[in-house]
Image: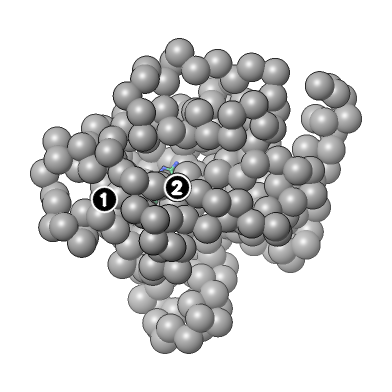
Amino acid sequence: MSEQQPEQIAKGSRYVVAVDGPAGAGKGAICRAVAARFGFSYLDTGSIYRGVALLSLQNGVSDEEELGEVAANMPFEFRAVADGGFRAFLAGNDVSATLREERVGRQASHVAAVPQVRAALLTFQRRYGGDNNIILDGRDTGTVVWPDADLKVFLTASLEERAKRRALELQGKGETVSFHKIRDMMAERDARDESRTHAPLASAKDAHFIDTTLLTLEQSIDSVVKLVDKLVGNRPR
Ligand code: DC
């Protein structure tokens, strides 16, 4: 992670699509599908916060300055895979599965509230993808990371529906967590992400708002694909 000031990194002529929303809204699956379909790079910004969270859990770091140092020096790397997805490496070790664990997500929400951590990760996010077209998802990608994104989407769904999806996902991995516990943890995480002082979860004013509560995954993907299609079709590079 570099120390260059984020505002010095220009968007250039590439397309930037910023997708924000709460946990479990379907951002990851939708962005992967869009990346695969249009050949965009995909950046799951939550994974970077999860990387800092994992290191902080492993090394017992909680001091804000130290967390900022951890973020600034994190030996983190993404490697793209064929379906638009990626694998995440910390110091050369594949930590993709560990990063998705609930305890890591919860810790990520804590470390993400630390301004030093957010500042350290901003440059990495703005540099990511080089000159490639990019789709990225998170909580502040359309408000803070790329306020000048070409297309912004705010994806959401009811808390019940998001918790249901997350429970199914965890069940699919053989983890047994009660629906009510997941729902309560999600509500707690939403509240923390929305209420923090620095770059809280928020929809950009110019974002397309999509509620996926009553949509299938295919329908959700389709609604974002249509927006990207319009963008790419309207403004060929
Ligand atoms: O999307 P996710 O569940 O992987 O994100 C984990 C946590 O990281 C989330 O609770 C808040 C934080 N986060 C953030 O603050 N800003 C982002 N752009 C992405 C994630």
Could you tell me which residue is drawn at 29 percent across and 58 percent down? 54
* 107 vs 13, nearest the viewer: 13
Q: Is residue 8 visible?
A: yes
As drawn, the residue found furthest toward the top would be 8
Q: Mark 1 Cα within 10 Å, few/some/many (few <14, many 20+)?
A: some
Task: Please state, as top left, top right, bottom left or bottom right, where the C terminus lies in the image.
Answer: top right
Find out whether the residues at labels 1 and 2 contact each other: C-beta distance under 8 Å. Answer: no
C-alpha distance separating marks 1 and 2: 22 Å
Mark 2 belongs to which amino acid? Glu
Query: Which residue is identified by label 1?
Result: 110
Rendering coords of residue 82 (x, y %):
70, 57
Q: Is residue 61 above or below residue 117?
A: below
Image x and y of residue 215, in percent:
73, 62
Q: Quadrant of residue 217?
A: bottom right
From the top left corner, tell me how far across and down residue 92 is, in percent. 39, 56
Pick the residue in front: 72 or 176. Answer: 72
Quadrant assignment for the N terminus: top left
Q: Report the residue at 84% width, 38% height from top.
A: 229
Q: Is residue 204 visible?
A: no
Q: Residue at x 50, y 81 (%)?
A: 173
Depth check: 66 or 30 in front?
A: 66
**Depicted 160 relative to depicted 157: above or below:** below
Q: Residues within 10 Å of mark 2 (few under 14, many from 20)?
A: some
- Disc 1 or 2, which lies upstream in sequence? 2
Q: Amino acid at mark 1?
A: His
Q: Residue furthest right?
A: 233
Q: Nearer the viewer, residue 93 or 156?
A: 93
Residue, disc 2: 77
57 left or right, relative to 123: left
